[in-house]
Image (cartoon, grey):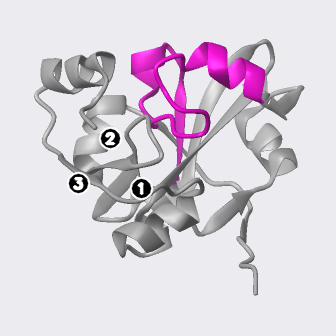
Amino acid sequence: MPLSERLRSFLDSRHAEFTLTSHPKAYTARELAVAERLPAREVAKTVVVFGDGEYHMVIIPASKLIDLHELRAALGFSQLRLATELELGKLFPDCELGAMPPLGPLYGLPVYLERTLAGQDTIAFNAGTHNDVIHMQTAEYRRLVSPQLVSTVLEPAFTRA
């Protein structure tokens, strides 16, 4: 499936260097890592939160879970919660639910990148669908997005037996 016009335009206008791959449907970031044969630490999971009256993207490795209490404190917010599915549908109308790329400037959202993911050489993330993945150098991603780096308490994601 080709990239959405909106996403393609964003990447092209910034002369982004990336590759695009496709795989069978993967609904979670960990499933994406398996489908792409990548370490989960290199796969970006986009978490959208609503804090102090605004939406924010927090990008963490697929191998981790986020602690909202620690994140709220780290960002200095008085209130913080996950965005609802209804809100995600409105914020990302050109994306399949849960497959939004971590490109906050494309959607007018500030981006916070977890330091452990920022330290990886490469990054992979959903390209708006549960089948398509963008791969790029992490330095290139940071150039495109200019995220604020954050360190939050992250717990290892459990796997089902």
* Left or right: where 141 falls relative to 13: right
Q: Is residue 126 magenta?
A: no
Question: Whole-percent x and y of residue 20?
Answer: 22, 48
State the SS at label 3. Answer: strand
Was residue 88 drawn as part of the magenta stretch in this picture?
Answer: yes
How far is mark 2 from mark 3, CA to CA? 9 Å
Please identify the quarter of the rendering in which residue 112 is found.
top right
Q: Which of pointers 1 and 3 lies earlier in the amino acid sequence?
A: 1
What's the distance in space between the residues labelled 1 and 3, CA to CA?
10 Å
**42 versus 8 height, above or below:** below
Q: Which mark is residue 137?
A: 3
Q: Residue at x 35, y 59 (%)?
A: 23
Mark closer to the observer (2, 3): 3
Q: Which residue is mark 1?
A: 118
Earlier in the chain: of badge 2 and badge 3, it is: 3
Which residue does the image show at 73% across and 43% down from the upper left? 74
Residue 25, percent across and down?
48, 55
SS class of the residue under badge 2? helix
Per the image, label 1 sits on a secondary structure element best described as helix
| Residue 108 on image: x %, y % | 49, 13
Position of 63 relative to 93 (above/below): below
Q: What amino acid type should be assigned to the residue bearing mark 3?
A: Gln
Q: Nearer the viewer, residue 73 or 30?
A: 30
